[in-house]
């Protein structure tokens, strides 16, 4: 969800000890943990100085578990019990899990698949929790204390089940999740884009097995993910595969045994990474029956072998921009994320596409964790060292409003307003002598109540009887820092009040939010028409009712021909308001209003005469 920073000038750094909080990038290929120390975000390395922890978990027969580099080394010997890329299975059912080829023994389970290992069935949540446990221990060892919590990043497209699974994994690992943060937003925060800039940013993330492009819009410190695209089956691993194929061909190897294949892929990966900084590298691997084989490869040849993979990502970038209705020139900056963006040809291609060099100052495989650490530090209540007191806040994901006459929505708090927030609006009664008012709280971007989500209903009673439109009812919406909404309605003259508390942000899943937003973008025009029609219908009803009241009270002021003309105008308005043309209704409304002008003037005279009857002139005025 989008985030905002507001400055709180009144608050000064507290003397209490810093609260330890970390940012965690729980990646498909690699995971890492970062923290803000002395005002700077940094990745926390393991005891051998390595910041990246391969997202690999191996289950052994004796019930023990290996995580990271050690497990990765064993992936070729014990593929079924060595789980790589577990992120792909988080919150996923069997059908999704088996979409990619893998060596695992899946067990169909309600909600999420499980994996059968030598030490029993494991859920992807448990596997991820093993990775998180290692990162938590690493953080507590290097920061010297217990963590108050963590910000964990997830892909922007992750749905509610995937997000919930991530949270559950953290809980299993004994981590308090301060917030889940979208990976592209975290990367943008790491670059400090949230402090300095306004505009549209692209985040190009090429990881080990996945490619994601996200378009973010930043306005007044609020990040909004406006479009996402990508390919869940395209990443750095595919570049390894191309080099492995070249190796197989150069050595006339044919189909490789699984063990050999794993070793060649590992060698190819090392060669690929080396080619990011060297013009030439060697793919070197021992092959059963052939001994150690080595194949030299130049950067140029590597680029040629993989050009189509890079092109596929560029096509996706263009398509995603098109979907968002943006030209490349409208993008203020491109953030590079993912270890595979270290490849110089990727940077060059992105630079050429956007017409400006991409942002590469921060390590692309650390940038997400660094942004998460900045966020965690703020959420834990630590103030930044440079004297600025920033506080991060959530925003309202969908507008909050009230149902008004005709099933229309009056928005009281707009989408993306930052919380806490309070907004009030005045409403009035619709009928003469109305003493109660039904208040219906809704959430959504659409114009009609029927298309929004109903959050709560309550009634305000004891409104003093007044003419329609005379009562003033002030409805206040208040959302506190935890996203709790309370709505209060207060009649202004007598002070009668009614209120209700609702929980808006937890009522909607991210999925629902995404769907509802999508719908409102697609239907804005239809909605405007529907709204115009309803408005005219409500106005027609109001005028017809008022005219009828006037006729009943003072009909004797009219000649029979005048009465007939007004009755005819009323009939025509009634007929028009059954139709679906707001303009026709509008013109009948003005015809009736015009046709009753004289009548209204006569009624006014009569009312004035009545009011004045029996009073002396000096009492008036
Ligand atoms: P994920 O987000 O999937 O966890 P990462 O961002 O850690 O993945 O990226 C992992 C990928 O980055 C791997 O394919 C790895 O080979 C690749 N990579 C890491 N360093 C380099 C490098 N120097 N040159 C090219 N590719 C690299
Ligand atoms: Mg990643």
Image (spheres, rainbow, N blue to C red):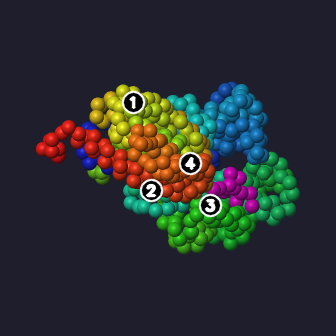
Q: Nearer the viewer, mark 3 or mark 1?
A: 1
> Mark 1 vs mark 4: which is more N-terminal?
1
> Mark 1 vs mark 2: which is more N-terminal?
1
- Could you tell me residue 583's position as x and y percent? 55, 58
Name the residue tied to disc 3: 323
The one of 463 and 424 positioned closer to us in this rendering: 463
- Could you tell me residue 484's position as x and y percent? 43, 34
Q: CA distance from mark 4 to mark 2?
A: 15 Å
Name the residue tied to disc 1: 435
Residue 594 bears which disc, if any?
2
Q: Which element is circle 4 on? A: helix
Q: Is label 3 in contact with label 1 (beta carbons under 8 Å)?
A: no
Give the residue at x 53% y 71%.
329
Q: CA distance from mark 4 to mark 3?
A: 48 Å
Magenta residues? 224-242
> Mark 4 vs mark 2: which is more N-terminal?
4
């Amino acid at each position: 969800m989008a985030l905002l920073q507001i400055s709180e000038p009144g608050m000064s750094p507290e003397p209490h000890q810093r609260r330890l909080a970390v940012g965690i990038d729980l990646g498909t290929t690699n995971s890492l943990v970062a923290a803000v120390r002395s005002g700077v975000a940094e990745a926390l390395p393991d005891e051998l100085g390595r910041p990246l922890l391969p997202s690999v978990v191996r289950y052994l027969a004796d019930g023990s578990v290996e995580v990271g580099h050690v497990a990765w080394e064993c992936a070729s010997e014990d593929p079924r019990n060595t789980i790589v890329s577990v992120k792909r299975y988080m919150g996923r059912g069997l059908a999704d899990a088996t979409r990619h080829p893998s060596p695992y023994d899946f067990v169909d389970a309600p909600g999420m698949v499980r994996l059968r290992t030598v030490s029993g069935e494991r859920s992807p949540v448990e596997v991820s929790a093993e990775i998180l446990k290692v990162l938590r221990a690493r953080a507590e060892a290097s920061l010297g204390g217990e963590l108050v919590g963590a910000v964990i990043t997830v892909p922007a497209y992750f749905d509610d089940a995937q997000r919930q699974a991530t949270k559950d994994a953290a809980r299993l690992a004994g981590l308090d999740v301060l917030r889940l943060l979208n990976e592209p937003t975290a990367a943008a925060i790491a670059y400090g884009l949230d402090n300095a800039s306004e505009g549209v940013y692209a985040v190009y993330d090429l990881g080990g097995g996945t490619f994601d492009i996200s378009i973010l819009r930043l306005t007044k410190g609020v990040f909004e993910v406006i479009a996402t695209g990508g390919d869940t089956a395209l990443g750095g691993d595919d570049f390894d595969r191309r080099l492995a194929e070249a190796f197989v061909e150069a050595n006339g190897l044919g189909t490789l045994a699984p063990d050999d294949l794993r070793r060649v892929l590992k060698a190819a990966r090392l060669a690929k990474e080396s080619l990011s900084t060297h013009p030439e590298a060697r793919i070197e691997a021992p092959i059963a029956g052939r001994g150690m084989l080595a194949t030299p490869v130049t950067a140029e040849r590597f680029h040629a072998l993989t050009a189509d993979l890079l092109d596929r990502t560029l096509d996706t970038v263009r398509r995603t921009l098109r979907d968002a209705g943006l030209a490349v020139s409208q993008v203020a900056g491109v953030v590079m994320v993912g270890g595979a963006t270290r490849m110089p040809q990727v940077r060059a291609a992105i630079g050429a596409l956007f017409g400006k060099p991409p942002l590469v100052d921060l390590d692309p495989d650390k940038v997400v964790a660094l942004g998460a650490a900045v966020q965690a530090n703020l959420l834990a209540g630590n103030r930044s060292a440079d004297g600025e007191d920033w506080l991060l806040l959530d925003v309202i994901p969908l507008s909050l409003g009230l149902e008004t006459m005709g099933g229309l929505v009056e928005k009281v708090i707009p989408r993306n307003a930052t919380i806490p927030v309070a907004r009030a609006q005045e409403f009035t009664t619709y009928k003469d002598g109305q003493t109660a008012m039904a208040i219906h709280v809704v959430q959504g971007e659409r114009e009609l109540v029927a298309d929004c989500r109903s959050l709560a209903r309550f009634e305000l009673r004891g409104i003093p009887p007044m003419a329609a439109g005379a009562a003033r009812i002030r409805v206040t919406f208040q959302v506190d820092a935890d996203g709790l909404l309370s709505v209060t309605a207060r009649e202004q003259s007598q002070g009668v009040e009614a209120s209700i508390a609702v929980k808006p942000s937890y009522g909607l899943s991210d999925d629902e939010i995404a769907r509802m937003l999508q719908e409102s973008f697609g239907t804005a025009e239809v909605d405007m028409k529907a709204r115009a029609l309803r408005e005219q219908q409500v106005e027609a009803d109001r005028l017809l009712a008022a005219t009828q009241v006037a006729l009943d009270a003072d009909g004797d002021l009219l000649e029979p021909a005048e009465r007939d003309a007004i009755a005819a105008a009323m009939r025509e308005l009634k007929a028009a308001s059954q139709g679906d043309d707001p303009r026709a209704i509008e013109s009948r409304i003005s015809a009736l209003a015009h046709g009753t002008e004289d009548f209204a003037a006569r009624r006014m005279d009569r009312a004035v005469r009545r009011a004045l009857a029996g009073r002396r002139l000096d009492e008036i005025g």
